[in-house]
Structures are given as structure tokens and as C-alpha cells.
Image: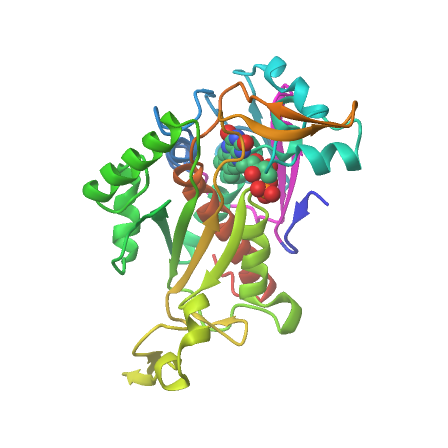
Amino acid sequence: MNTIGNDIRITLWGGSHGSHIGCVLEGVKGGLELDNDKITEEMSLRRPSPGIGTARMEKDEVLFLSGVTEGVTNGDPISIMIANNDTRSKDYEQFRHRPRPGHADFTAVIRNPNHDIRGGGMFSGRLTAPLVAAGTVCRLGLEAEGIDIGAFTRGIGEVIDPQERSIEECWDSRAFSSRACTKDLDDEMIETIMNASSEGDSLGGVVECHLENLPIGVGEPWFDSLDGELAKSMFSIPAMRAFEIGDGLLSSRSKGSEMNDPFTLAGNEVFTTTNHHGGVLGGRSSGMPLVFRCFLKPTPSISKTQCTVDLESLQDVQLQIEGRHDPCIVPRAVAVVEAMACHCIYDMMSRGGFLEN
Ligand SMILES: Cc1cc2nc3c(=O)[nH]c(=O)nc-3n(C[C@H](O)[C@H](O)[C@H](O)COP(=O)(O)O)c2cc1C
């Protein structure tokens, strides 16, 4: 239910306005050095930036309650806990009876009348904080195997980055609050978010993620294919609406002669001269860069007046949403996409017997 992964599993717990949130990360072998600076850096990339993120400010200090001895994993389940301090629960009580359009409130309370509505409860984007912490542990494991990962904001609303990007450019995006690859795009994306926000509205967008130096063959046949497992991981992130690998949707409009990536040799190594397939063939890594994109919808909570139904009086009503929300979650979601990708690939490498270090 709240667990993802096979060999390496994350079990998520907590709610947006409970005292703490966290997860248990199982299956990570002992001897992995946890770099505190790296964990702090990844957590800060998920935190909101002034003007383009929610005004809710959490420290997001990560506590490792078990599984780590003197900064090194010891092979036991790793218990991760993060405090919630900056909560304003009164803003949310009305959503139990008057669900926010586009949010999880409606399905959550119909299925479970005891649902903790405060801050969206378990369905809140807040729960992605422990996912980033757990994903960073997996990332350190992947880096020990020589695998590189990076992601950036490909688009926000109508502002789309048209260039092909390298993994180094993905890393450059860490300097910009929108997570765009360049300063010009960062300025444009921030402006478009600010404009939507000043109109009481919100925007969605696209995150692109790259992984390099994967061995050939990661991914299990049929139902546990690499692309299938990655898609599941990405769809676990709230507000995710579509996922594509390589040329993705465009491939349905290509000819075989355009889409097929020719094989060639460099010394004894086989690789492809182009990468329309995005690094996955037959549900397994091909050794080429794994490139995928995630499409996120606009934040549901907007300050424009909206129509909803009062579930007690069974009447159509107008809803005015108060409280603090991200006008666009895409810049923060970049760190979450990276974290979930790291967990998925680390798990799939373990399953396939690829982990050496
Ligand atoms: C990092 C992050 C932050 C989010 N912040 C908000 C927010 O401030 N307000 C909001 O209404 N939704 C926010 N969301 C999105 C909702 O959690 C999500 O849209 C909602 O639970 C409905 O789920 P669905 O969009 O997957 O159907 C956030 C999502 C993420 C990943």
C-alpha cells in the first residue's frame, strides 16, 4: 500500500500536519557512507523558493533513527524522520465537506471518512520530503557504482526549453530556483509562475531526467520492465499526469527508419549512434543514457473562486481557498523525480544482481 520496491523498499508514513513524517528504507546493504552535505543539498532543492513556492517554511532536518552507525549504513532498516513545524491546520477543515477541485480531498474522504484532512494529510506533497531523503541514500549507492543522475525543468506552462540538454546542464540547473538550465530560461519561468500566481492561478510543467553509465540489461522481463517500474515510481508523485521515455509520444508519429537507433562499435563496445529509444529496449537498459520526461499538472489549490459541492448539505457551493500553496510545484518536483528514479534504479540493479559496491 504505502510501500514501493522489491529488494530495496520504501515504506512511507505520516501526514502533512502530523508531528512528523518519515519512511523506512529497507534492503540497503551496510558500509555505504552517508554524506550529510549531500543529503542537506538534495533536501534544500525540494524546499520552496520565495515567490514561486509555498510560504510554508520547514527546516526539513533529516533524522536517521536506525540503520546508520556513525554516518555509515549498517544493513538494518533505515528509519528516516522529519518534523512538521510550520502548520496552519484551520485553513483545511472546510475541505472535508467541500472538497477542493483537482485535489485528493474528494476521493480521500469518500473512501475514508476518518481521513486526516489537515494539509491534505497523507496525500500532501509534503510526504515527498522523506522520499527525497531515502532517494538520496539510494543515489549515494548508485554513485558508488559510477552512475550519474540529473534532472531539470524542461517547461513551465507555455515556456518550454527547446534545446537538447546534457547531464552537465542538468546539474547546472541546481543554481536556478526554477531548475531551468540557463539564467534566461530561469527568468522566463519565474515570470510566468509569478504572473499566474498574481491572477490567483497555478501552472504545471515538465521535468526531464537523465541517468548515465547504467550497465546493459537492468530490468526484468514483462511485468517488471525498467520502463514499467520507472513509470510506477513517477506516478507515485502527486500531480504527475504523464510519463515518456526517449522520443516518447513523438515515436507514435515517426517512421521505423527515423525511430530506430543504428548500432555501431567503438572498440569492442556496442552503442547506438542516436538515442530516440531513450536508453530502454525490451524493458531493459541499453547502456545508452536513460532519458525520460514527467508531465505535472497545475497545483490544484488556487485562490480564484471555484465551484464545488457541499457533501453535507448536498448543494452546489462556491469555494474560496485560503492558506499557503505552491503556485507551481514543478521546480520542487525536480528533486523528487531524481530521488524516485534513484530508488527505482537502485532497486532494479539489486534485483538483477548488478550491485558491486
Ligand atoms: C512537491 C509537491 C508540492 C505540492 N504542493 C501542493 C500545494 O501546495 N497545494 C496543492 O493543492 N497541491 C500540491 N501538490 C499536489 C497535490 O498533492 C496533488 O495534486 C493532489 O494530492 C491530487 O493528487 P493528483 O494530482 O496526483 O491526482 C504538491 C505536489 C508535490 C509533488
Q: Vertically, is 249 above or below 96?
A: below
The stretch drawn in magenta includes residue 25 = yes
Q: Vertically, is 245 above or below 301?
A: below
User: On the image, which quarter does residue 200 sit in?
Assistant: top left
Most foreground residue, 122 or 59: 122
Q: What range of the chain is rendered magenta?
A: 8-34
The x, y position of residue 42, in whole percent, is 41, 37
The stretch drawn in magenta includes residue 124 = no
Q: Vertically, is 267 above or below 168?
A: below
Q: Is residue 302 left or right of residue 26?
A: left
Q: Is residue 309 left or right of residue 194?
A: right
The residue shown at (54%, 65%) is 226
Q: Is residue 74 visible?
A: no
Q: Quadrant of ligand 1?
A: top right
- Number of marks in picture: 0
The x, y position of residue 44, in whole percent, is 39, 31
Q: Is residue 31 left or right of residue 178?
A: right
The residue shown at (64%, 55%) is 7
Q: Residue furthest left?
A: 184
User: On the image, which quarter does residue 189 sit in?
Assistant: top left
Q: Is residue 84 visible?
A: yes
The residue shown at (27%, 58%) is 166
Most foreground residue, 53 or 71: 53
The x, y position of residue 306, in whole percent, is 56, 29
Q: Vertically, is 281 above or below 245?
A: below
**Quadrant of image for the N terminus:** top right
Rendering colour mode: rainbow
